[in-house]
Image: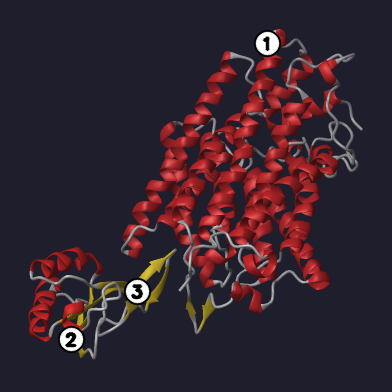
């Protein structure tokens, strides 16, 4: 196992923007800018940003609970609380050191270290702590939440027809192996970071489109819900609780300030605090842009504004700004988010045309807007190259999609991933769990 | 006695109730229903896909009145519930064989 120092340094250098500059400064001058105070503020910032990102799990859960039909709500709740917990265990057992191997790569630049994560001793007893960064505990906690977010993206797309256990087995693979391996290529200082100059501040590609590719592979292997596409038409299945879906979206919106803001990684100088503030403001602007564009476009295209799409538009805006929330002006951030909203409006019916059934719009929001946001980095950050961004999108996409597709096909062959027709009609709540979300609501 | 069954637009319920109590109707049964008539549903768009809503929400009133009052009740409902647009609803009237008030045992007109 690598030393904590190198793990922390690599993690910090890889995520910081501009990451390379930090790595060089840190390697040359190891004097912390403000002594223990800087370490304390960095760590404190990670803890706060981390629990905001943790709260995004609640956001995804409520969004999904609201957008599935009444008969599948309990299952969606069960899957979300389970996947969040599985991510916690898998990231500890395998993920963290695969993603941040420091100098302990198994295959340099491509495959990280296989080791269980461990924290610094209680009270930092007997250690010479690197005061230029933050505590390993806070770093682990913060990064773990990103792994959990990636898994949350998958559950919404596959809702209402997937069996519980195969889904959870896939979550183990995703959070233990697939996500950390591809994330190490960028944030662990691997190939995309060191050779391609790829820039992805908080994870439009590393988190969101990675989750989106895994969801797309799952949706293709799983097939659409019964009756969704029949007689040459598309039959919508309206969600059961739009107040919950809206609450979930606002929770995600709130959590995103931790997601993007915390990815600054440092809060030990005035410059870093000012940058975090820029990131908060830009993140909000992008979400607002996504909402407003979706609101107007759905009014123009569909006669009435569609709330579920407007909610997707907010998230599309947030995903779009995630690759570069620091350098854009407020205006540019609004437009980048607005473009994300527009992409959602066109991607949702496009997937329906292809008969790819994505219950909550995870693929338009996380995959399509994730790609857009990654490309949009070149608009405001001159350190990014279009080729570096494009190649990285393709490499990450090819890896995550292929491994996910094979995993889903193996799961399908070995244990089956889809409930029976009867169970699907009855609803997963009663069929798989024997428990309804709203037992006192009649359904006539 | 006559049973009058009326299906009306849900937003007209309160207005119809007030008009009927004003002419002396002392009770009615109200049910939320779905159905279709000449209006025969409409289409909505959800997430960019158009779909048919085959059953339209309506409110159903059931009112039992003495025969002499039936025509006035029907006219009042019709006048109050009318918007002139498609989907205003329908009114039916049927003969009722008997009525009984559970508390007192009164029967027929006295039970209404």
Residue on which the image places disc 1: A37
Among the 4 quarters of the image, the one containing residue B48: bottom left
Q: Is residue A93 above or below residue B107?
A: above
Taking A395 as reference, is A310 left or right?
A: left
How far apart are the alpha carbons under marks 2 and 1? 87 Å
Answer few, some or many: residues within 10 Å of disc 1's Cα (few below 14, many 20 plus, some between 14 and 19): some
Taking A303 as reference, is B94 left or right?
A: left
Q: Secondary structure at mark 3?
A: strand
Residue on which the image places disc 2: B2
- Have a look at marks 2 and 1 and say if they share a chain: no
Whether residue A200 is visible here, answered yes or no, is: no
Q: Residue B44 in the image: x percent, y percent?
A: 36, 70
Q: Chain of mark 1?
A: A
Q: Secondary structure at mark 1?
A: helix
Front residue of this view, candidates B92 and A42: B92
Q: Chain of mark 2?
A: B
How far apart are the alpha carbons under marks 3 and 2? 37 Å
Q: Is residue A61 above or below residue A124?
A: below
Q: Residue A223 in the image: x percent, y percent?
A: 64, 72
Residue on which the image places disc 3: B43
């Amino acid at each position: 196992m690598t030393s904590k120092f190198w793990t922390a340094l690599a993690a910090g250098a890889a995520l910081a923007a501009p990451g390379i500059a930090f790595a060089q400064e840190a390697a040359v001058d190891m004097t912390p800018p403000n002594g223990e105070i800087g370490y304390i503020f960095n760590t404190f910032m990670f803890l706060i940003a981390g629990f905001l990102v943790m709260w995004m799990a609640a956001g995804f859960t409520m969004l999904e609970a609201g957008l599935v039909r009444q008969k599948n709500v309990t299952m969606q709740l069960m899957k979300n609380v389970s996947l969040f917990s599985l991510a916690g265990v898998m990231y500890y057992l395998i993920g963290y050191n695969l993603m941040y191997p420091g100098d302990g790569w198994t295959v340099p630049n491509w495959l990280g270290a296989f080791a269980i994560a461990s924290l610094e001793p209680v009270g930092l007893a007997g250690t010479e702590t690197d005061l230029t960064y933050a505590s390993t505990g806070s770093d682990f906690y913060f990064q773990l939440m990103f792994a959990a977010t990636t898994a949350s993206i998958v559950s919404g797309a596959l809702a209402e027809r997937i069996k519980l256990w195969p889904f959870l087995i896939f979550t183990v693979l995703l959070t233990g192996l697939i996500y950390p391996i591809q994330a190490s290529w960028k944030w662990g200082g691997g190939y995309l970071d060191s050779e391609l100059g790829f820039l992805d501040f908080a994870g439009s590609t590393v988190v969101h489109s990675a989750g989106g590719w895994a969801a797309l592979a799952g949706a293709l292997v799983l097939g659409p819900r019964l009756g969704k596409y029949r007689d040459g038409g598309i039959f919508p299945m309206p969600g059961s609780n739009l107040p919950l879906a809206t609450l979930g979206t606002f929770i995600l919106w709130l959590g995103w300030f931790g997601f993007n803001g915390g990815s600054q990684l440092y809060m030990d100088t005035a410059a870093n605090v000012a940058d975090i503030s820029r990131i908060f403001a830009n993140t909000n602007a992008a979400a607002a842009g996504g909402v407003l564009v979706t609101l107007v476009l759905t009014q123009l295209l569909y006669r009435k504004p569609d709330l579920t799409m407007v909610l997707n538009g907010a998230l599309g805006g947030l995903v779009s700004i995630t690759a570069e929330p620091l350098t854009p002006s407020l205006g540019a951030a609004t437009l980048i988010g607005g473009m994300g909203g527009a992409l959602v409006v066109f991607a949702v019916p496009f997937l329906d045309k292809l008969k790819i059934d994505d219950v909550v719009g995870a693929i338009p929001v996380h995959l399509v807007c994730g790609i857009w946001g990654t490309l949009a980095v070149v608009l405001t950050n001159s350190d990014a190259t279009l080729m570096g961004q494009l190649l990285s999108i393709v490499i990450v996409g090819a890896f995550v999609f292929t491994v996910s597709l094979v995993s889903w096909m193996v799961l399908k062959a070995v244990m089956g991933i889809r409930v029976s027709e009867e169970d699907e009609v009855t609803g997963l709540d009663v069929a798989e769990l024997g428990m309804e979300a709203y037992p006192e609501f009649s359904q006539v | 006695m006559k049973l009058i069954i009326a299906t009306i637009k849900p937003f007209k319920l309160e207005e119809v109730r007030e008009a009927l109590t004003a002419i002396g109707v002392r009770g009615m049964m109200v049910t939320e229903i779905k159905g279709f008539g000449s209006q025969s549903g409409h289409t909505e768009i959800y997430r960019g896909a158009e779909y048919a809503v085959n059953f339209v929400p309506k409110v159903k009133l059931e009112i039992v009145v003495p025969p002499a009052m039936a025509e006035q009740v029907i006219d009042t409902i019709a006048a109050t519930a009318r918007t002139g647009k498609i989907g205003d609803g329908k009114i039916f009237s049927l003969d009722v064989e008997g009525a009984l008030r559970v508390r007192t045992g009164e029967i027929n007109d006295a039970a209404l």
